[in-house]
Image: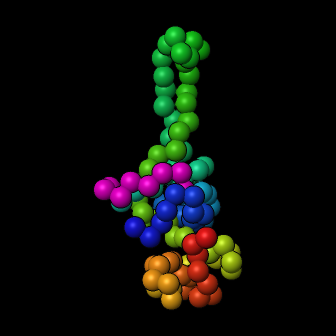
């Protein structure tokens, strides 16, 4: 997967199109990511001992990886990602627009 936890991504399709957020969790088996502040769902809960008032809880739901694109930290645009092997043999991610290394 080309998107990792902590990356800033932009949603490119769906009800939350053009929203940006940080990746909180990546599920490579299901090809899904959870993004901060995107794809909010409401869950109605009964009162329990932990939450005596109950009520409506808002959580981020997973979104498919094909519906998001990485935002380059250098050029601040959504971009495709390429792989590059450095001289020391490490493999890093590269922005296709500005050709800069995305990894820290």
Figure quadrant of residue 73: bottom right
Q: Is residue 83 left or right of residue 76?
A: left
Quarter holding the N terminus?
bottom left
Q: Residue furthest left?
A: 29
Is residue 12 positioned above or below 91 on the image?
Answer: above
29 in magenta: yes
Indicate whether 92 appears above or below 67. Answer: below
Q: Looking at the figure, which quarter contains the C terminus?
A: bottom right
Q: Residue 72: x, y in percent?
A: 62, 75
Colouring used for the render? rainbow
Type of secondary structure dominating the magenta stretch: strand
Kindly identify the residue that appears in the image at 51 percent across and 35 percent down: 42
Image position of 58 (left or right of 2): right
Q: Position of residue 81 (x, y in %)?
A: 49, 79
Residue 10, x across and y down, in percent:
57, 65
Residue 79 image offset from top left, x and y in percent = 55, 78
Residue 53 in view = yes
Which residues lie in the magenta part?
A: 23-30
Residue at x 59%, y 80% (from the top left corner): 101
- Is 36 within the magenta? no
């Amino acid at each position: 997967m080309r998107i990792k936890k902590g990356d800033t991504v932009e949603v490119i399709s769906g009800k939350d199109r053009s929203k940006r957020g940080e990746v909180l969790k990546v599920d490579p088996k299901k090809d899904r990511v959870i993004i901060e502040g995107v794809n909010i769902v409401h869950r109605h809960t009964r009162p329990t001992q932990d939450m005596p008032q109950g009520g409506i809880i808002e959580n981020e739901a997973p979104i498919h990886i094909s519906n998001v694109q990485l935002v380059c930290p250098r050029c601040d645009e959504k971009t495709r990602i390429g792989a590059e092997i450095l001289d020391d043999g490490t493999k890093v991610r590269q922005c296709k627009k500005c050709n800069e290394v995305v990894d820290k």
